[in-house]
Each structure stands twice: as structure tokens, then as C-alpha cells.
Amino acid sequence: MHNIDGQLIDEGLILAFHAPGSYTGEHVLEFQGHGGPAVLQAVLQTAFEVARSIQVPLRQAEAGEFTQRAFMNDKLDLAQAEAVADLIDAGSVQAAKAAANSLSGAFSKEVNALADRITHLRLLLEATLDFPEEEIDFLEKANAKGQLDGILSLQRALLIKAQEGVRFNDGLQLVLVGAPNVGKSSLLNALAGEEIAIVTEVAGTTRDRIKQQISVRGVPIVVVDTAGLRETDDHVEKIGIERTRQSIQEADLLLHLVDATDANSLTNLDIEREFSSSLPVLRVLNKVDLVDSIESPRADDVLISAKTGRGLDNLKDRILDTAGLNHSFEHSFTARQRHVDALHVCQAHLELAAEYAKQDDRILDLFAEELRLAHDALGEITGRMLPDDLLGLIFSRFCIGK
């Protein structure tokens, strides 16, 4: 390609993709050069200058515009379109595989299969409502309760997978908590494979939260090292301890680190009382290299030495197991929090429908309405029921050129 003065900018290829075989489903002309910001900027500048000279409207694409056009032209549904951005941003090989599965339609297929089951039940119900003179005992003859139980089972299983998919995107929030000087910073460094946090024998060295993203068995994990929990008069340390408690509220999983040389201290019991009962907690006994035996260990205790590396492989496996992330990711897919929220809404409406199904047929219209609302919630995942302003917000978060 030459600029308007005839000077050579770059040598490359020009490829024409004809509709509907292109990525966007439209006619597309693609330039392939040798890359580099300066070269690309010169090519773009020349293209705009040529377009102005022949009075052809030409502009730079908005963020995510090509993928949005693919969505609008039914080349991708919204879950697949979002997977494009997930694939670009993947923080590990397993996360990339999961995003590729979403892009190929793995998540969408399960959503659509669930929606089809709801649609079938809705059709049976609507037929009953349209022809009441037939006096068909819908709930019994159509096995509506049985069908709805099967739908709820599918929905709950899909919700678990979607929550796992969110962790591929956002990273599992793993918070290290415990008394001062139990080895939280040493464990962070051991998991990260480098010296991230300062480690000393002085209790209270860590005054603030330290975050580090790591990969465990291919799963992205954000490890948060926190200030040790204890009573203190130090104003700065008090702020750090308050931030520790805030991190606990934001965590997906807690690692309660305990000094193996004093595993059954009252301090550890006091710390455990602060944990939310709904939050998964792994009790990890550190410094096992300093003891010959541990007095009355718990059956689910994880024994490690952050200093020597003993037990770290087992700890990584237990982290994934406790977080509900098994080790078979070949059929996993990425998801986003909005997908999980939509599935929760779907579940709420299905459960209400189940309540109506337990009653007589005088409230079949309410049963039908809850099924419709559940179906609409699923449509938000694939983009069938999403408002235009939310669509614009979703695609605005893509990078330029996608």
C-alpha cells in the first residue's frame, strides 16, 4: 500500500469476504500487513484520506462493533458474542478453552435446551387454557409437575456451571486469613512462585491487603493476603484488620491459616467465629515442618509447609474441590455475572410455578405467567429479550477492532 503521495507504507494482502460468509455476515474487506502501531496508523490515515477524496463515508469502528454486527445479523447469539471478549481476556489456557467452548455455542446450547423444555410445557398449558370446555386435567394428564421438576433440575445444574464459568472470567477470590505470623504472606509467595509479600518474623508485618493473580490447575485465582486478625492499639494495623474483614465478605473461598505448633489455640477459635456460615472455608495448618505430630487434627485439615513446599499440591487440589471447580474442564464454558443473575431470576419464577402446580387448575393462568417470565429470563442470556441500551453497554466493553 502507498500513501496519497505515492510513498510505500507496507506490503500485504487484501482479502474479500462476501456476505453472509464473513464474521459479521456482511461484505468485508480485510487488510493484512506486517503490523506495528506506526504502520497500522499510516494505513488507516491513508484509507481515510482516500475515502474523503472520493467522498465515501468512512469511520473507525466502535468498540465491539464487528461482533455486535455479527450478533445483529444472527451469526452469533449474545452469549457467544461475549465469549469473543472472554477469549481475548483469558488469563490461562483452561480459561481460553472454556471461552472457546462458549464461542462454539456450548453454553447457548444448554440455555436453549432449557428454554425448549419450558416452551413445550407452556404450549401444553396454553392449549388447556384456550379450551377449558374440554375439562382436561392438565396437571395430571400432561404430567406438568414431573416436567417442571425436570426443568428445575436442568436449571439448577446449568446455574452451577454458569457460576463456575464466571470464575474463569473473574478469577476465584481466595482470601488468606488468620492470626498474625501464621505464614499467610509466605503461602502467597509459595503459590505465586515469587516474592510478592514481605515476610518477617515480626507479627503484624502485613498492614494492608495484597492481591496477586495466579493459576491453579489452569483456573485463574486471585489470592488476597490480609492483615492478621488480633486485638491491637496500632491505628494503621486496625485499618488493615478492618479491610481484612471486608475481604472476607467479598471472598469466594477462605483459607484459614493456622500455626501447626499451636493449632488448638483460643485465638483460632475466635477467628473462626467471624466467618460466614455460608462461605466455604479450608482450614490449613502451616509450619508442619516444625512439629513431629499435631494434637487432635481435624479430619478435613490441610497440612502444609509454605517454607518447604510440603503439601502445596494437595492444597491446590483441595482449593478447587472446595470451590466446586472439579478437574475436568474440557466441557466447561465461560459465563458472566449477568448470566448467573438471569438464571437466578429464572429459578425464582420456576419455583413459583411449582408452587402453583401443587394447587388446583383455577390458578393455571398464574402457572403460565411464571413459566413465561422464566422463559424471558433465559432470553436475556442469549440476547433475545435484552433492551438495546443494555446491548450497547455490553459491546462497548469490547476492544476496538472486535
Image (cartoon, rainbow, N blue to C red):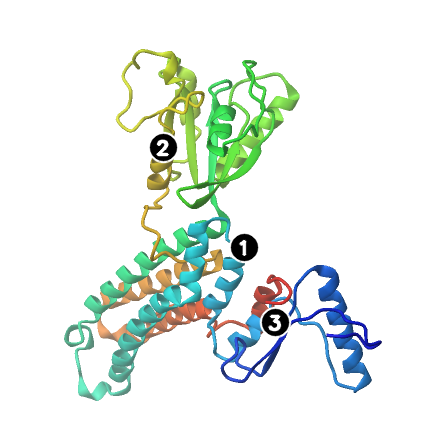
Q: What is the distance, in whole Å, between disc 2 and disc 3 at their CAs? A: 44 Å
Residue 21 in the image: state x and y as whole percent.
Answer: 49, 81
Mark 1 crowdedness (10 Å alpha carbons): few <14, some 14-19, many ≥20: some
Q: x%, y% of residue 51?
A: 76, 81
Give the percent coordinates (x, y) of residue 219: 43, 45
Q: Which residue is mark 2?
A: 313
Instruction: Please determine whether, in this image, residue 69 is positioned above or below residue 88.
Output: below
Question: Residue under circle 1?
Answer: 89
Question: Label 1 sits on what residue type?
Answer: Asp
Residue 7 position in % (x across, y down) = 81, 72
Q: CA distance from mark 2 to mark 1?
A: 27 Å
Query: In the rendered image, which residue does mark 3 sit on?
Result: 65
Q: Quadrant of residue 37?
A: bottom right
Q: How many marks?
A: 3
Q: CA distance from mark 3 to mark 1?
A: 17 Å
| Quadrant in the rendering for residue 353 | bottom left
Quadrant where the N terminus sits is bottom right
Residue 34: name its quadrant. bottom right
Q: Which three-letter amino acid code belongs to the residue tagged 3?
A: Glu
Q: Earlier in the sequence, mark 2 or mark 1?
A: 1
Left/right placement of residue 191 relative to residue 374 reads right
Q: What residue sits 57% from the left and 19% below the top?
A: 204
Front residue of 181 and 333: 333
- Label 1 SS: helix
